[in-house]
């Protein structure tokens, strides 16, 4: 239900589940993450100021995997790491972020991050951050990104009211070359 009490939400932004079926809900309005058990019962919330953790300012994205929970904070321009009990483990990424929103794990265990106008790939094991693409400058606010079955990146552009499909240039070039080769043999793929 709506509210500020335990298990209540004001502006749920994104959700994630871990390997055991626990659900984590980013509560933008209450500046916290609430955790629910697989049956939907509220367990606890985390994200307030404590010790080394400054507290969430504007939590937006979340992803959970391998016993860790990653939370993007749009105003702090940071992705934080927590354990499944909500204990703060540290900053995962903050250098060069402009407005992190949604987080999604890829099949190989890396994180896709929608960051205002661009899509980033973050590697939890190495800490390496790589830009995969950008949607330009005008009327762009990427709020979520994911990988489709063909390996393309789908990015929702909130400002423009559209979903963009991003393909790797070498994949496009390979498709064009394949079409030329096949058409020279009388077949068009």
Image (tube, helix red, strand yellow):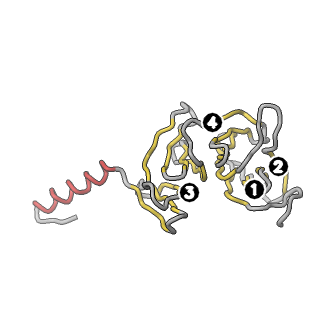
Residue 13 shown left or right of residue 115 in the figure: right
Task: Find the residue positioned furthest to the front.
Answer: 138
Residue at mark 4 = 92
Residue corresponding to mark 2 = 45
Residue located at (20% from left, 54% from top)? 177
Mark 1 in CB contact with mark 2 (< 8 angstroms): yes
Element carrying mark 4: strand
Residue under the point 65% across and 46% down = 72
- Residue 186, image x, y percentages: 11, 65
Asked whether 174 or 72 is in front, the reply is 72
Dot 2: few (<14), some (14–19), or many (≥20) neighbours within 10 Å?
many
Q: How far apart are marks 1 and 2 (CA)?
A: 9 Å
Image quarter of the N terminus:
bottom right
Q: Is mark 1 on a helix, strand or loop?
A: strand
Nearest to N terminus: mark 3 or mark 1: 1
Circle 1: is it few (<14), some (14-19), or many (20+) Cα within 10 Å?
A: many
Going 69% across and 59% down the picture, which residue do you hit? 13
* N-terminal label among 3 and 4: 4
Q: What element carries label 2?
A: strand
> Which residue bears the numbered disc 3?
144
Left-right relation of 41 to 135: right
Find residue 128 and report its horizontal and vertical position in percent.
51, 33
Q: How far apart are marks 3 and 4 (CA)?
A: 19 Å
Residue matched to label 1: 27
Using the image as rendered, state which of residue 30 and residue 89 is in the foreground.
30
Q: Do the residues labelled 2 and 4 touch (CB within 8 Å)?
A: no
| Within-10-Å neighbours for mark 4: few <14, some 14–19, many 20+ | some
Residue that extends furthest to the right in the rendered view of this protein: 5
The residue most toward the bottom is 161
In primary-sequence order, the first of circles 1 and 4 is 1
């Amino acid at each position: 239900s709506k509210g500020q009490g335990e298990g209540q939400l004001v502006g749920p932004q994104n959700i994630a589940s871990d390997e055991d079926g626990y659900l984590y809900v980013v509560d933008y309005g209450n500046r916290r993450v609430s955790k629910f058990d697989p049956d939907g019962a509220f367990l606890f919330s985390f994200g307030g100021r404590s010790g080394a953790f400054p507290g969430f300012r504007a939590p937006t994205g979340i992803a959970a995997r391998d016993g860790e929970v990653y939370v993007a904070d749009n105003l702090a321009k940071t992705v934080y790491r927590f354990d499944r009990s909500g204990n703060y483990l540290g900053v995962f990424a903050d250098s060069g972020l402009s407005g992190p929103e949604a987080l999604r794990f890829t099949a190989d265990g890396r994180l896709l991050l929608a960051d205002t106008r661009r899509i980033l790939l973050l590697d939890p094991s190495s800490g390496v951050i790589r830009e995969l693409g950008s949607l330009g400058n005008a009327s762009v606010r990427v709020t979520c990104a994911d990988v489709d079955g063909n390996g393309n990146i789908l990015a929702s552009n909130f400002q423009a009211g559209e979903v963009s499909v991003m393909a790797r240039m070498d994949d496009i070039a390979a498709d064009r070359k394949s079409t030329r080769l096949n058409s020279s043999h009388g077949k068009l793929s």
